[in-house]
Amino acid sequence: MKEYNTRQKELILCFLREHNHDSYTASQLSTLLPDVGKSTLYRILSHLEAEGALSCSLKGRSRIYSFRKGECVGHMHLLCKNCGHFIHLSKEATRKISSIIENDTGFSISEIECEMRGVCRECHK
């Protein structure tokens, strides 16, 4: 499939890379990136998600997108339901949580692609 709007795709990727600890809805990205048309934005977000460059989850009825770092495999993530802050849990913390699950349930974990939702430290203040 031929790639279109590579400048716009790069604008989206650059923005999300620079803000890799935050999550955004397509509507928020549309406001923050006025040079990218809405239909183009939705199409590119869909392609980037399929390629694994973006993580997508639900916040209410909205899809929220975060940049996936190269090392974003094999550990859990925390997502603040209030502000959208996206936290990459360390591999050590993920290993400890996985160990607890295995010890409590006997379930042997082979892959981890987990996102836990709650409220971040800043939103608790």
Image (tube, rainbow, N blue to C red):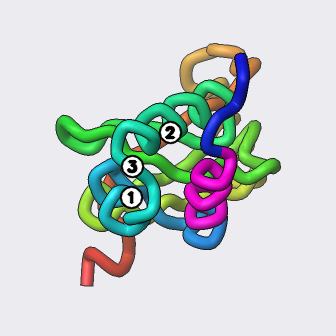
Q: Magenta includes 73? A: no
**Marking on residue 37:** 3
Can see residue 80?
no
Out of 45 and 23, give the one closest to the viewer: 45
Q: Residues within 10 Å of mark 3 (few under 14, many from 20)?
A: few
Instruction: Tell me the amino acid under the disc marked 1.
Output: Leu
Image vertical order of residue 114 relative to residue 9, above or below = above
Magenta span: 6-16
Q: Residues within 10 Å of mark 1 (few under 14, many from 20)?
A: many
Q: Residue at x 38, y 46 (%)?
A: 64
CA gap between label 3 and label 1 equals: 10 Å
Q: Residue at x 61, y 25 (%)?
A: 50
Magenta-drawn stretch, dominant element (helix, strand or loop): helix
Left/right of residue 31 with respect to residue 54 in the rendered view = left
Left/right of residue 121 with respect to residue 91 in the rendered view = left
Residue 15 percent across, percent down from the top left: 57, 66
Instruction: Tell me the amino acid under the disc marked 3.
Output: Gly
| Disc nearer the start of the sequence (3/2) | 3
Residue 33 percent across, percent down from the top left: 43, 64
From the image, tell me which residue sits under label 1. Answer: 29
From the image, tell me which residue sits under label 2. Answer: 45
Can see residue 38?
yes
Asked if marks 3 and 1 touch (Cβ < 8 Å), the reply is no
Q: Magenta includes 10? A: yes
| Disc nearer the start of the sequence (1/2) | 1
Image vertical order of residue 94 relative to residue 82, above or below = above
**Marking on residue 68:** none
Out of 47 and 115, give the one closest to the viewer: 47
